[in-house]
Image (cartoon, rainbow, N blue to C red):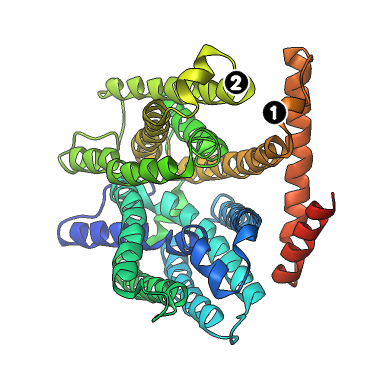
């Protein structure tokens, strides 16, 4: 297979590759979802009081995002300058993902009543590093298979919520069952099964296929058509975690409506990637060259929709007396509409952007774009959390930027967000997660 053959397999191999990429899309994010969506359950299992929840989630989130970025950097450091035998290396990475899920189960179920929280924490970090590393090889090898990878990602989030619902409906009686312990034990076990299936299928596909394709990833020539998908993916991944879910809907409506908006999102989020995958399956999708598909450039309009939503969310927080704020804050319908528009714009741009980069340049560009978007994610996630931390510290009646000019106020919020982001990074590195969380909360109470 040549360096720029982006076809998703040939003849009988095509269906195997489609299954492999759907499996890896479904299983790749499992440990991230266990860490984040499963945080309320692991909090109880490790006997951390519920009022420490936001701090606990923040620690997990920051640790996993930074660990993921380390994996992204490592993947690029190998692929771009070396790039040999990527198929075989990706097989090893997928088996590593399977093994780390087994270790994660051990870290969760052992340790007696209080458990091994620090062991669990660093195992999640290790899984996130493997995830970031694996993602770069998927970008490198994916070509036209990327649409099938993208379609499985939102489905994995839906399946996680369904698992929670089913297990809670069976084991929800907390007087009779250790519900929180059971639910994540089952979820991690399912993750072990699917990562094992993924690694097995990946081995079948890339043992049989000549993985020397990785050596020639820089052969394709740059085409201006690639600018649009690079912009779409960069903006989509940079902005999304600044505002969702912490600000929109988190700070705009009561929690009961946050949950309802999330449920609605869960139902609609898979739709864009499913449509794109169906179009690509019939050779009408964005994958491949855009010379005769220039209409796909029109999807950059969703950059505008994300930026407009971001501005509206920011105005709603900082100008509570404005007409914009009054029409959004504590208005579930409008908040829900804007949040869904914001998130769906993100999903559409990812579904269109990622599969089209290799065809309009080369597979090295797809990997390099992974580093670009990964950098955007870690920078904006940390700044976003730093901003939310600072925002929650202040009483609206004693607002720190009252009387400041717009530019001065902006500088204040950026500097404080940056300072809080640095503090959050420092707190990631610990040998005793429980001690550090309790210590941090005591400090806040003293202040």
Q: Quadrant of residue 126?
A: bottom right
Q: State the separation of the CA atoms marked 1 and 2.
A: 9 Å
Residue of label 1: 396
The residue identified by callout 2 is: 320
Front position in the image: 91 or 420: 420
Residue at the image point whose x is 36% and y is 34% from the top: 344
Q: Residue 117 — which label?
A: none
**In the displayed structure, does residue 25 sit left or right of residue 121?**
left
Q: Give the image location of residue 122, x and y in percent.
A: 63, 70
Across and down, in percent, residue 26 comes to: 34, 59
Q: Is residue 72 shown above or below 381?
A: below
**Marks 1 and 2, the one that precedes in the sequence:** 2
On the picture, is 430 further left or further right than 192? right
In front here: 423 or 41? Answer: 41
Q: Is the residue marked by circle 1 packed among few (<14), some (14-19), or many (20+) residues within 10 Å?
A: few
Label 1 SS: helix
The quarter of the picture where the N terminus appears is bottom left
Of residues 196 and 18, the one nearer the viewer is: 196
Q: Is residue 164 above or below residue 217?
A: below
Q: Residues within 10 Å of mark 2 (few under 14, many from 20)?
A: some
355 relative position to 390: left or right? left
187, above or below 80, in the image: below
Q: Please report contact status of discs 1 and 2: CB closer than 8 Å, yes or no.
A: yes
| Residue 106 x/y as whole percent | 52, 83
């Amino acid at each position: 297979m040549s360096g720029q053959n982006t076809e998703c397999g040939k003849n009988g191999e095509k269906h195997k590759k489609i299954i492999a990429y759907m499996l890896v899309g479904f299983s790749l994010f499992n440990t991230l979802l266990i860490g984040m969506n499963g945080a309320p359950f692991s909090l109880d299992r490790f006997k951390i009081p519920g009022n420490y929840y936001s701090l606990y989630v923040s620690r997990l989130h920051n640790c996993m995002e930074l660990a993921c970025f380390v994996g992204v950097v490592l993947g690029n450091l190998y692929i771009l300058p070396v790039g040999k035998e990527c198929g075989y290396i990706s097989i090893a990475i997928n088996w590593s993902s399977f093994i780390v899920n087994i270790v994660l189960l051990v870290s969760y179920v052992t340790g007696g009543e209080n458990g091994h929280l620090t062991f669990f924490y660093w195992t999640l970090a290790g899984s996130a590093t493997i995830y970031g590393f694996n993602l770069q090889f998927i970008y490198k090898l994916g070509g036209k298979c990327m649409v099938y990878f993208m379609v499985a990602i939102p489905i994995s989030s839906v399946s996680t919520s369904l698992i929670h619902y089913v297990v809670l409906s069976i084991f929800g009686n907390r007087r009779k069952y250790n519900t929180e312990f059971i639910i994540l034990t089952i979820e991690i076990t399912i993750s072990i099964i699917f990562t094992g299936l993924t690694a097995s299928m990946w081995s079948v596909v890339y043992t049989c296929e000549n993985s020397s394709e990785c050596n020639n990833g820089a052969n394709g020539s740059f085409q201006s058509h690639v600018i649009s998908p690079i912009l779409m993916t960069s903006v989509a991944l940079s902005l999304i975690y600044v505002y969702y879910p912490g600000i929109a809907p988190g700070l705009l409506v009561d929690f009961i409506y946050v949950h309802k908006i999330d449920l609605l999102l869960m139902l609609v989020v898979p739709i864009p990637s499913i449509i794109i995958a169906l179009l690509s399956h019939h050779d009408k999708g964005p994958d491949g060259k855009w010379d005769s598909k220039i209409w796909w450039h029109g999807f950059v309009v969703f950059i505008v929709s994300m930026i407009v939503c971001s501005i509206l969310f920011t105005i709603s927080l900082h100008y509570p007396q404005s007409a914009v704020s009054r029409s959004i804050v504590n208005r579930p319908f409008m908040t829900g509409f804007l949040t869904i528009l914001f998130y769906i714009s993100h999903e559409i741009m990812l579904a269109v952007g990622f599969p089209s980069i290799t065809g309009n340049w080369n597979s090295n560009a797809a990997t390099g774009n992974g580093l670009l978007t990964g950098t955007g994610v870690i920078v904006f996630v940390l700044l976003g959390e730093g901003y939310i931390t600072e925002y929650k510290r202040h009483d609206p009646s004693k607002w720190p930027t009252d009387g400041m000019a717009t530019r001065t106020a902006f500088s204040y919020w950026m500097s404080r967000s940056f300072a809080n982001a640095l503090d959050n990074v420092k707190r990631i590195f610990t040998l005793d997660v429980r001690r550090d969380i309790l210590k941090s909360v005591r400090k806040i109470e003293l202040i």
